[in-house]
Image (cartoon, helix red, strand yellow):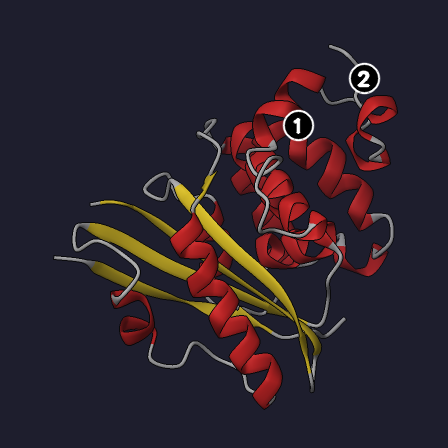
């Protein structure tokens, strides 16, 4: 029987050195081989570059959580000094520092189309939320799958999207973070679309075997 987990949505409120090769200054200090392994959506034709980058950053947080905390998270917080003592930031730092390495997510075509359809719908209609998630996913996924969904609103910058979901500021239970760092999920599909009220919406769907 399929296990359905509709994760919360987030609305806006606030050792080869790789950067020279990737063009991503956020990844200074990262091993190029690790980055390449994390970039599982690199050759996917149906995703935008920003969508691929979201996958890459998410995978880096799973594969090398301690390094992610000491580089990407640390540098991100320099732009938001008020968050450095935030309880959700502190709990994220603790979670990453104690986490074990997980496999990278693999892009999935059916998950992408599921996410893309919902991102289009909520963006066009100015809506929020997951709607009837069980109905939306039943035509896309096999019965013996665990499925979940994260939604972020307000941004199309990949690092900002990933950091907001991982920090999960103000979200009781940090459901977005738990989905991203969930070992039971193995596949990912995501879509970033314009939203008439929040500018952007990023819908991320996950699945894995039961």
Which residue in the protein does label 2 denote?
Answer: 17
Along the viewing direction, whichever of 175 and 193 lies nearer the viewer? 193
Residue 135 in the image: above or below residue 166: below
Quadrant including the C terminus: top left
Gap in angstroms between the C-alphas marked 2 and 1: 13 Å
Q: Is residue 30 left or right of residue 56?
A: right
Along the viewing direction, whichever of 24 and 164 lies nearer the viewer? 24
Image location (x, y in percent) of residue 192: 63, 63
What residue is shown at x 46% (from left), y 69% (from top)? Answer: 8
Residue 174 visible to the viewer? no
Q: Earlier in the sequence, mark 2 or mark 1?
A: 2
Q: Quadrant of residue 18?
A: top right
**Which secondary structure lies at badge 1?**
helix
Q: Please, which residue is most extreme toward the front here? A: 45
Q: Is residue 63 left or right of residue 25?
A: left
What residue is shown at x 61% (from left), y 80% (from top)? Answer: 123
What residue is shown at x 52% (from left), y 65% (from top)? Answer: 116
Image location (x, y in percent) of residue 24: 82, 35
Residue 82 in the image: above or below residue 15: below
Quadrant including the N terminus: bottom left
Image location (x, y in percent) of residue 2: 18, 58
Label 1: few (<14), some (14–19) or many (≥20) C-alpha neighbours in 10 Å: some
* Mark 2 or 1, closer to the camera: 2
What residue is shown at x 70% (from left), y 80% (from top)? Answer: 198
Which residue in the protein does label 1 denote?
Answer: 67
**Which secondary structure lies at badge 2?**
loop
Q: Quadrant of residue 33?
A: top right
Q: Quadrant of residue 111?
A: bottom left
Q: Please, which residue is most extreme toward the top here? A: 15
Residue 109 visible to the viewer? yes
Image location (x, y in percent) of residue 158: 71, 52
Which numbered disc covers residue 201? none
């Amino acid at each position: 029987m399929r296990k359905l987990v509709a994760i919360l949505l987030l609305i806006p409120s606030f050792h080869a050195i790789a950067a020279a090769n990737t063009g991503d200054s956020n990844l200074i200090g990262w091993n190029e081989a690790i980055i390449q392994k994390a970039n599982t959506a690199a050759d996917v034709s149906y995703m935008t570059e920003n969508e691929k980058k979201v996958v890459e950053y998410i995978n880096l947080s799973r594969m090398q959580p301690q390094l992610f905390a000491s580089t990407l998270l640390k540098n991100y917080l320099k732009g938001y000094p008020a968050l450095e003592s935030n309880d959700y930031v502190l709990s994220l730092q603790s979670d990453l520092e104690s986490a074990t390495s997980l496999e990278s997510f693999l892009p999935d075509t059916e998950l992408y189309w599921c996410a893309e359809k919902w991102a289009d719908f909520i963006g066009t209609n100015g809506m929020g939320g997951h709607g009837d998630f069980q109905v939306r996913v039943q035509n896309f996924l096999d019965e013996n799958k665990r499925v979940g969904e994260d939604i972020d609103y307000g941004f199309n910058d990949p690092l900002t999207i990933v950091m907001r979901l991982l920090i999960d500021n103000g979200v009781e239970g940090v459901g977005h973070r738990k989905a991203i760092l969930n070992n039971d999920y193995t596949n990912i599909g995501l879509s970033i679309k314009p939203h008439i009220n929040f500018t952007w919406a990023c819908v991320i769907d996950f699945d894995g075997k039961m």
